[in-house]
Image (cartoon, helix red, strand yellow):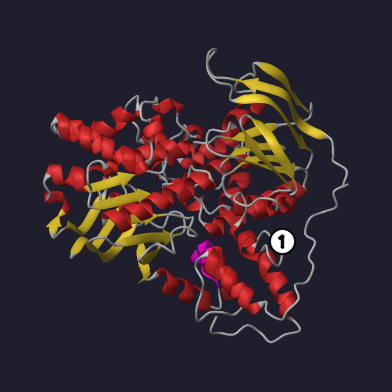
Amino acid sequence: MVLLEFDKVSFAYPGAGSRSLDQVSFTMCEGEYLVVCGQSGCGKTTLLRNAKRELAPAGAREGVVFYRNTPLHQLDADIAAMEIGFVQQIPDNQIVTDFVWHELAFGLENMALPTPIIRRRVSEMASFFGIETWFRKSVHELSGGQKQMVNLASIMVMNPSLLILDEPTSMLDPIAARALFDVIKRINKELGVAVLLTEHRLEDVFPTADRALIMQSGQIIADSSPAQVAKELAGFRERQRIYFGLPAPARIFSELGAVNEIPLTIRDARTCLSKYMQGKTPQTSEFAPPSDQTRPNPVLRGRELWFRYTPDGADVLRGLDLSLEEEGILCLLGGNGSGKTTLLKVLAGIVKPHRGKVKVSKSAKIAMLPQHPQSMFTRDTLLEDLLDSADGDRNAVDSWAKRLEIDEFYDRHPFDLSGGEIQRAAICKLLTRGADTLLMDEPTKGLDAYIKRRLTGILRELNKSGMALLIVTHDLEFAASCAKRCALLFDGTIISEDTPHTFFAGNRFYTTAANQIARDYFPDAITCEEVIACCRTSFTASAPLSRSG
């Protein structure tokens, strides 16, 4: 039975020169798991919000969205509120109460359900999500992953038939993201709830989803099973942008020529690699630089840093030491709530440590990209904001805006941009300031894989010209391809720091998908490109890979 239907839906934001959705048509059945993919700004979020009446954006709309054969705008208010659930990108944007149990009960109380029913449903969902131990905690004490789990539970307590999620893991560390995806999978498989999801992390989504919709410029250009989509994208001689967002197993084996049967999971990719390595000798590859390399002088240093937000609160930073060298790229990783953003604020001088010192080179000019890029914009148009940052230098603005593909948005209000577009705009604004030391908090949030590759190239280029970068990120693949050194923050202090190859090769969970696939044969390979190169070297003296995969 058809649950959701888009019938030739078009949509344009006020003042926009083009449509965000252009004649979009598709159907979604009861209990189906559907993932929507595409580059930043292609219309994914707009599509999702048009499926939730209360969140539908203002603008010019054509066509009809049906829910169980009823036009969405004619749907009963109670049905629209309870049966169609929506989880947003940023966890804090959706939390409205003070304690976890209040948050779970909030929606049911607004629907005026009897107290016994509310208590039963809340306790049931708390048990299903495994949040009994923090059931009575303040929401302000929760990590980002816990907050997003509360948001999901507060939606599921309403017993929806359709669960819509807009990049729900964009603010989560890899382990929290996998935990959330596991719960979403259980909701779909065990409870029969249909899932409509947008996501850039496809490793955890493609193996589970029933269908994948590929969007480009507001249109659906592909609608098939994830395996079929991966196979079609792998078969194109010229790589489309969405190809770079495919799971690592698909990219590795498509490059190696196995296009008839593309693996989507790490397990299947390991099986394929084991099969093809039979009778072949892995060639030794040393990606890590010598350990006795001299370290340049630090441009930014924190010594014995301690910090807490309230006098009687818990310590967020606990005697932390950190050094960012000249021409260094240090990627800082760690779980939600480990103190990464707090550390950036301390180093940037936004907040002062309770103990310890921050020492900055006298010649350093520091600029910081905050976790929430909207806070960087104050003018009515993007161009005005960028010119302010560049001291009126239009050439500098045009140069960076073109490279980050935001020059077509000059006349738009910054808050009218999509999540990925405003992230690129914030990075552009940062780069026009002429700083020589950048502190960046989650710079790849909301960016598609192709833009992330371009950003990696830009940052490496700036680094070669003398810029130092300290980057907080949850994106392991980005860190592996961009960083010169990686550090892990845990329990308020840095417990591990090394070169990317040594760092990731020594981890079991906090490592890249490429390393998980190939570590038995090429333990130092941490990117898809490195695994592919190692395989090709090992296969040189043997027959090429079978096309049957």
Q: Is residue 329 left or right of residue 86?
A: right
Q: Residue furthest top?
A: 311
Quadrant where the N terminus is found in the figure: bottom left
Provide the residue designation for mark 1.
523
| Residue plotted at (13% across, 42% down) | 77
Q: For residue 55, which quarter of the picture? A: top left
Q: In this view, does 29 lie to the left or right of 77?
A: right
Front in this rendered view, residue 230 or 64: 230
**In magenta stretch: residue 244:** yes
Which segment did they paint magenta? 239-247
Q: Is residue 495 above or below residue 222?
A: above
Q: In this view, does 125 lie above or below 100?
A: below
Q: Position of residue 370 (x, y in %)?
A: 55, 34
Q: In this view, does 222 lie above or below 513?
A: below
Q: Residue furthest bottom?
A: 543
Quadrant where the C terminus is found in the figure: bottom right
Q: Where is residue 285 in the image (x, y as percent from the top left)?
A: 78, 65
Q: How many labels does the image show?
A: 1
| Residue plotted at (42% across, 47% down) | 180
| Residue plotted at (35% across, 53% down) | 186
Res 458 seen here:
no
Q: What residue type is labelled 1?
A: Pro
The local crowd at label 1, few if under 14, some if 14 to 19, many if 20 or more residues have their Cα within 10 Å, is many
